[in-house]
Amino acid sequence: NAGVTQTPKFQVLKTGQSMTLQCAQDMNHEYMSWYRQDPGMGLRLIHYSVGAGITDQGEVPNGYNVSRSTTEDFPLRLLSAAPSQTSVYFCASSTGGNSGNTIYFGEGSWLTVV
Amino acid sequence: KNQVEQSPQSLIILEGKNCTLQCNYTVSPFSNLRWYKQDTGRGPVSLTIMTFSENTKSNGRYTATLDADTKQSSLHITASQLSDSASYICVVSFNFNKFYFGSGTKLNVKP
C-alpha cells in the first residue's frame, strides 16, 4: 500500500514551458486535491476532485489544469510556467462524505521556474 | 473571511521539555479541526482530528484541545524529543472536504 505517490520530486522549468505533476493513490479514495505551499503561508488549494470525471477550482487555480479520468490518478498540468509558480506542490486524497476522514498527503514536488 | 492563525511562528525548546502551540480560527460554520506534523522536505502527516463536540484528543505525547466557543485550539507536546522538530499545522474544515490551513509553527527541539 503506497498511499499517495507524487512524481517528480524535483523539477526545474524555464518560463513558458509546460509540464505535468503526477499523483496517484491506491486507497480507492474519492476525494483528491492539489495544494501549493509557499514560505510563510499555509497550504492553498489549487484544484480538487470529488470523483472520477468531476473537478473543480480551489483558491488559486489560475495557470493550472487538472483532469480525473480514473479514481486513482489526478495529474496537475502547468500550461505555461511562470516564476510565480515556483513552489512546493502537494497532492492529497481522502474518503468522501465523512467530515472526520483523514487527509493523506504525498511527499511533495519541488518546482522551480526560472 | 475564513482564517486560521497559528502562534508562535517558531519555537525553540530543550529536549524533554513540554510546549504548547496555539491555533485561532474564524472559519464558520465549523466542521472539524486537525493538527498535522510536517517534517522538513516531507508531506504533512495527521496527528489528531476533532469535531466541534470534542474538547480533547490525544495521540501519544501529543494532546490537542478545542474550545469551539472561543474558536481556539492548542497542541500540547509532552516530554519533547529531537524527532518532534518539525512544523505543526492547524487545519480547519467548514464543510465537505473544504479545508483552511494555518501557516504552521516551526518547532526546534535542541539536545
Image (cartoon, coloured by chain):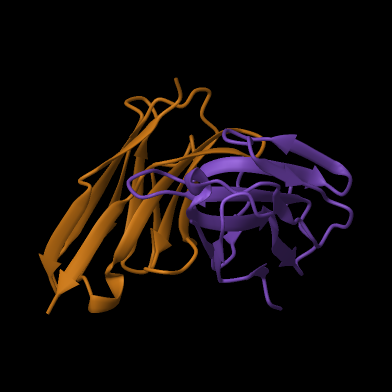
The quarter of the picture where residue B26 lies is top left
Q: Is residue A106 visible?
A: yes
Q: Position of residue B36 (x, y in %)?
A: 43, 56
Which residue does the image show at 20% across and 53% down from the upper left? B10
Which residue does the image show at 40% across and 61% down from the upper left? B37
Q: Position of residue B103 (x, y in %)?
A: 36, 45
The quarter of the picture where residue A8 lies is bottom right
Q: How many marks?
A: 0
Q: Is residue A97 visible?
A: no
Which residue does the image show at 46% across and 27% down from the upper left? B27
Q: Nearer the viewer, residue B96 or B101?
A: B101
Q: Residue furthest top?
A: B1
Q: Nearer the viewer, residue A102 or A25?
A: A25
On screen, residue B11 versus residue A10, left or right, reads left
Q: Is residue A34 above or below residue A54?
A: below
On screen, residue B27 versus residue A80, left or right, reads left
Colour of chain B, in one word, is orange
Q: Is residue A107 above or below residue A69?
A: below
Q: Is residue B85 above or below residue A70?
A: below
Which residue does the image show at 84% across and 41% down from the upper left? A54
On screen, residue A53 versus residue A7, left or right, reads right
The quarter of the picture where residue A91 lies is bottom right
The purple chain is A
Q: Is residue B77 above or below residue A7?
A: above
Q: Nearer the viewer, residue A39 or A42?
A: A39
Q: Position of residue B78 (x, y in %)?
A: 23, 65
- Position of the N terminus of chain B, as image quadrant, is top left
- Position of the C terminus of chain B, as image quadrant, is bottom left
Q: Nearer the viewer, residue A13 or B4?
A: A13
